Image: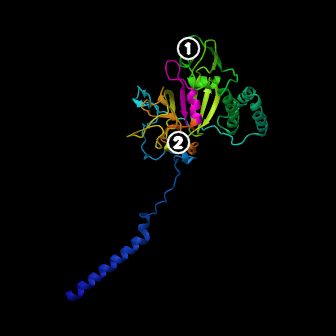
Amino acid sequence: MYWYYKYPLYCILILLLTGVSVFIWRSSISPYFHQEKPAPVEVDLPTEEPPEDLSSLPPPATRPASNASQTRPGKPVQVPPVNPASNVAAPTFKPAPAKPAVRATSIPGDLQAKLSGLRTLVVESPLKARQEAQELLSQCTEYDASWLALARIIDQANKKFMSGTAPCPEKATYTVVPSDSLSKISGKVGTTVGALQRLNKLSKTSAIIRPGQTFQYFPCEWSIRVSKSQFLLCLYHGKQLFRIYRISTGQYDRTPVGTFVISTKTMNPAWYDGTHKIPYGDPRNILGTRWMGIQATGDTDPSLRGFGIHGTTEPDSIGTASSLGCVRMLNSEVEELYDFIPEPKGSFTVPVTITE
């Protein structure tokens, strides 16, 4: 056979044998080497739960700048102890945050009846109404509806005691001696000329006093507690709630929390807007008629400066977060509070606590 017939036949035969071999491989041997892999099993791994209340999330990082330092007081970092045998830090466990007390938004029926009687009684007998309200107040959760209603009874009663000669257990008596003046007396007993004038119905235009006169005054046992969330400034005498005032706090959470003390007092204050001194009476001055500066104490960040309690030229802002970080009050109310807070010197200091 000629070569040009023989070699093509060889090629065809080789191709046929190759095809048969591939068919046999795919049908009988290949499945043992190409088994299907099992599908991956999905496992639900524990993830961090999102907060129930989105308002608890931290505020955005970018905030408008303030005229005063806004560093929030913080606690020192706790370094875990080291096990000397292994040189490995011992694990620490962070306890779950305590849930805030649940505050009732309605007043129980039995208390409503008592409140109705107290509102009538506080007009006729403020001291008796106050005593009954204080007993009931101790049974309530702070700032719930019942607490606030009873606090208003106490506030109404004590407003009478702060504006005249009506007697109450907290008041003390001072007898004028020769060479006394109202300013000397206020420095001795830890009060102010304004408080002596209010409590004893003295003329604000005449400072004449005579030996043997007796004046009523409140000893300096005042403390102030500010609740940012409730927009309330609570004035305490000793351990008893004495007055409550509606306030305005800083927008964007600018009002710091912590412990402070009244450090300065100024009537008709000028306002510094960061670059200019704006005098009292100028429409751009937002401080109102009184200023009481506060200074950080205890563990509160000492760099928190420039904050205070003051009046306002914007009375509609009370009850909102609208200040630059200070605590705003109505002018008439800050003037009353100002009169009972002594000059911050010596042992006569008034602590201020600001809470969320």
The scheme the figure's colours follow is rainbow
Pick whichever, 138 or 3, lies toward us.
138
What is the quadrant of the N terminus in the image?
Answer: bottom left
In the rendered structure, which amino acid carries the disc numbered 1? Asp
Q: Residues within 10 Å of mark 1 (few under 14, many from 20)?
A: few
Whole-percent x, y for residue 14 in the image: 29, 79
What is the quadrant of the C terminus in the image?
Answer: top right
Label 1 residue SS? loop
Q: Is residue 212 left or right of residue 254?
A: right
Pick whichever, 163 or 98, lies toward us.
163
**Residue occupied by mark 1:** 180
In the rendered structure, which amino acid carries the disc numbered 2? Thr
Residue drawn at the location 63% of the way across and 34% of the way down: 244
Q: Is residue 46 left or right of residue 10?
A: right
Magenta span contains residue 335:
yes
Pick whichever, 247 or 332, lies toward us.
332
The vertical placement of 307 against 209, above or below, is below
Segment colored magenta: 332-356
Q: Quadrant of residue 151?
A: top right
Residue 313, labelled with which disc?
A: 2
Residue drawn at the location 56% of the way across and 19% of the way down: 182
**Mark nearer the viewer, 2 or 1:** 1
